[in-house]
Amino acid sequence: AERAEEERARALDDRHAELTARAEQEVREAERELADAREAAVRRQEEARERAAEVVAEARLCQERVARATERVLREHGERWDELQAQMDSVRSSLSSLTGRAVE
């Protein structure tokens, strides 16, 4: 009976050691996976910052292009306005000469 008890105790100790070793291995694997996940998160954060900087730079370039195009259109419209005003002045002058009256 004592021998059987010792064998059961030894078997339990062996099983406990086996389960402990397996649990320790799983903890090590989980720690490695956690470290990998943290590294991946840091990389993704860095990539996100880099991409955000690229997007902001592209937006600034686009803003500058739009501003230049707007300035050009406004300048062209201003020039056209001046041309039309000069034509209207010429027409008024011609009408005044023809009719002898001031034209508004």
Image (cartoon, rainbow, N blue to C red):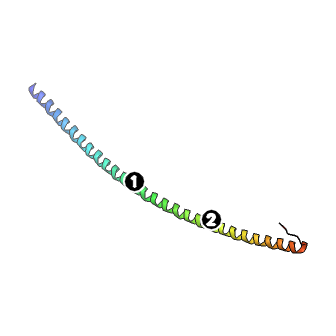
Quadrant containing the N terminus is top left
Reading the image, the residue beneath label 2 is 70
Which quadrant would residue 46 be assigned to in this image?
bottom left
Residue neighbourhood size for the residue with mark 1, other residues' Cα within 10 Å, grouped as few (<14), some (14–19), many (≥20): few
Farthest residue, direction right: 99
Report the label total. Answer: 2
Is residue 10 rendered to the left or right of residue 73?
A: left
* Residue at the left extreme of this rendering: 2
Q: Secondary structure at mark 1?
A: helix
Nearest to the observer: residue 75 or residue 1: 75
- Image mark for residue 4: none
Q: Which kind of residue does numbered mark 1 sit on?
A: Gln
Location of residue 79 with respect to 7 vertically, above or below? below
First-in-chain label (2 vs 1): 1
Residue 90: horizontal and vertical position, in percent? 81, 74
Please tell me which residue is depicted at 52% across the width and 62% down the height of the picture. Answer: 60
Residue 99 lies, in percent from the top left, at 90, 72
Residue type indicated by callout 2: Thr
Q: Secondary structure at mark 2?
A: helix
Q: Position of residue 98 (x, y in %)?
A: 89, 74
Q: Nearer the viewer, residue 54 or 60?
A: 60
To which residue does mark 1 refer? 45
Residue situated in front as seen by the camera: 96 or 62: 96
Q: Quadrant of the C terminus?
A: bottom right
> x, y (%) of residue 9?
14, 31
- Identify the residue shown where x is 49% and y is 59%: 56
